[in-house]
Image (spheres, coloured by chain):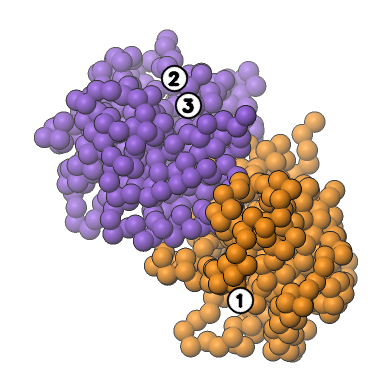
Chain colours: A purple, B orange
Amino acid sequence: MPKAPIRVAVSGAAGKIAYNLLYRIASGEMLGKDQPVILQLLELPEMLPATKGVMMELEDCAYPSLAGMFMSADPNEGFKDAEICILLGSRPRGAGMDRASLLTVNGEIFAVHGKSIAESANPDVKVLVVGNPCNTNAYIARNAAKKVGRINAANIHSMLRLDYNRSLWQLSAKTGRPIESFRKLVVWGNHSDTMYSDYRHCESNGDAVEKLIGDASWKFDYFVPTIAKRGSVIIDARGGLSSAASAANAALNHVRDWVIGRDDWVTMGVPSDGSYGIEEGFIFGFPCECKNGNYKIVQGVEIDEFSRAKLDTSLNELRKEAATVKHLL
Amino acid sequence: MPKAPIRVAVSGAAGKIAYNLLYRIASGEMLGKDQPVILQLLELPEMLPATKGVMMELEDCAYPSLAGMFMSADPNEGFKDAEICILLGSRPRGAGMDRASLLTVNGEIFAVHGKSIAESANPDVKVLVVGNPCNTNAYIARNAAKKVGRINAANIHSMLRLDYNRSLWQLSAKTGRPIESFRKLVVWGNHSDTMYSDYRHCESNGDAVEKLIGDASWKFDYFVPTIAKRGSVIIDARGGLSSAASAANAALNHVRDWVIGRDDWVTMGVPSDGSYGIEEGFIFGFPCECKNGNYKIVQGVEIDEFSRAKLDTSLNELRKEAATVKHLL
């Protein structure tokens, strides 16, 4: 008896991240080779012809696990009955656009999408916001969804997985230990320069990673700035193209772990329940445990003085972003 | 005991097909999640900075199965000890460039790559040529490799898998049968307008596909022209961008089936051994069976008068292409 298909809605479906992500979802890499998926592709009206091209290519991959697909420029149609929504569509910062304007134009998109998801998606929908500034976009979407009710607003996440994966690789390269040996890495906060990649509790095959690294200055002089600047270094190397493939991979990892589970802490941007002194409702990177399709924030991680300051800095940034878009809340 | 890594060399590593393919190879989708790979990325010297960006993103995916990687602009270094070479790098047709010029500029690339692979790759290397015109590029590479010896020149393939996958989807859409139900589809010939997608022997769950379709005119009026024109229809829809994601997927399928095996006929562009009246040495789409890392051309497929004419047309095209590049052979 084949499994019932899962509806996966993706906004920004003709964009660069989608061009890497959709083919991997349809191949079964996100939810399993034996799990049929129906792709619901949301785009702006003027992008529908290009979206049609993306759909033709999905057809031409002859994926057994792709049970159906359609495109739409209407959010209520695009999100209809979706169990998973991955929100890639956002405006990039244009020339001369300040951060407040960027927050506002994107906030308008996510206010609409949050409302539509709450109105039309499956009540158990899981939502991942990738479009930047993703934490505040998720915050806006969550506020809009809460006004409608119907869905679980705790299931609106933002993506810190790319920062988490970037951190894993740097730790592996530094220590010579394999990627899969690391456990208990955390990336706290906002997906921005203020995020705090924290390997104080991280282990590799039972060894404390801090001890393996030894040199404490490496964290401040190399690791933290490298993770923070990685996106712009890649844009420079790729001649202006952003890190679409690794962002797509991170989105796939986030959803996969959330749905399938993972025997480790994994960092997700989730609505705070007040844990670690983070004001309730802000979408913040926390260590999470995923099991049976649910996640919970790991409790009891020691927060030292340095870490407290980092978390507060990131929280303050989120407060400021929220203040900028408060007309949308 | 973990498996020894397999070295996979990819040319055109900073190009659009590679940007979809490399992440899927590194994730384990081509050779298996438990099979470590080392990626050897070949590019033109001026593309090495962009290739570095691609490598940083591969790092940032934190793939457990990516055991190592490097980039090079030197073919002998890029192909060194490779067990699999996927040749994506070719020149697209420029404005005002005729087909003969296109054949020549690409032929020069593949003469160099064929020679380098024969000199430096693993003697059991499997080579897939994706860069177009892929059959004649593979023919040139094979001739160059044969002069060196050392590798098995029967293992230089061209890619007809995208045409094959496109055909599978069209048959599935027409009959309402699932993709995975189809068996014994063949795409004969050159990867060009002259290729012949042939479902005369194709079955779906034991039913003859020709009978399921009924209307014989569908093949000529819709199916054959749709497959032949699919690439350009997608370029139009995507505003000038070619079908990179589905080409990457097809390359992955080709290599995967060749290495892992497949319990069905699968179409590969392989050097003819004289089967079906195709002159020995030309790289031609044939039905193949793959087992234990080896392939063989399926024998005994009935060739009726219509099919004979189609095969001969495609062969004649390959003869003409070979004549155009005979100074490179």
Q: Where residue A132 appears, x then y in whole percent? A: 31, 42
Disc 3 from disc 1: Cα separation:
45 Å
Q: Quick check: B314 left or right of A70? A: right
Q: Which residue is mark 2?
A: A295
Asked whether A222 or B287 is in front, the reply is: B287
Q: In the image, what residue occupies the spot 41% across and 64% down?
A: B238
* Label placed on residue B193: 1
Asked whether A289 or B50 is in front, the reply is: A289
- Residue located farthest toward the left when viewing the structure as drawn: A327
Residue kind at label 1, given as amino acid type: Asp
- Decide: is A304 above or below A17: above
- Residue located farthest toward the top when viewing the structure as drawn: A300
Disc 1 from disc 2: Cα separation:
52 Å
Q: Chain of mark 1?
A: B
Q: In the image, what residue occupies the spot 48% across and 58% down?
A: A56
Check disc 2: other Cα within 10 Å, few if <14, some if 14-19, many if 20+: many
Question: Secondary structure under badge 3?
Answer: helix
Q: Which residue is mark 3?
A: A258
Asked whether B327 or A257 is in front, the reply is: A257
Residue kind at label 2, given as amino acid type: Tyr
In the picture, the quarter occupied by the N terminus of chain B is top right
Q: Chain of mark 3?
A: A
Question: Secondary structure under badge 1?
Answer: loop
Q: Quick check: B25 left or right of A238? A: right
Mark earlier in primary sequence (2, 3): 3
Residue kind at label 3, given as amino acid type: Trp
Check disc 1: other Cα within 10 Å, few if <14, some if 14-19, many if 20+: few
- Nearer to us of marks 3 and 1 is 1
Q: In the image, what residue occupies the spot 52% across and 48% down?
A: A23
Asked if labels 3 and 2 touch by Cβ distance under 8 angstroms, the answer is: yes
Q: Chain of mark 2?
A: A
Q: Where residue B252 appears, x then y in whole percent? A: 65, 53
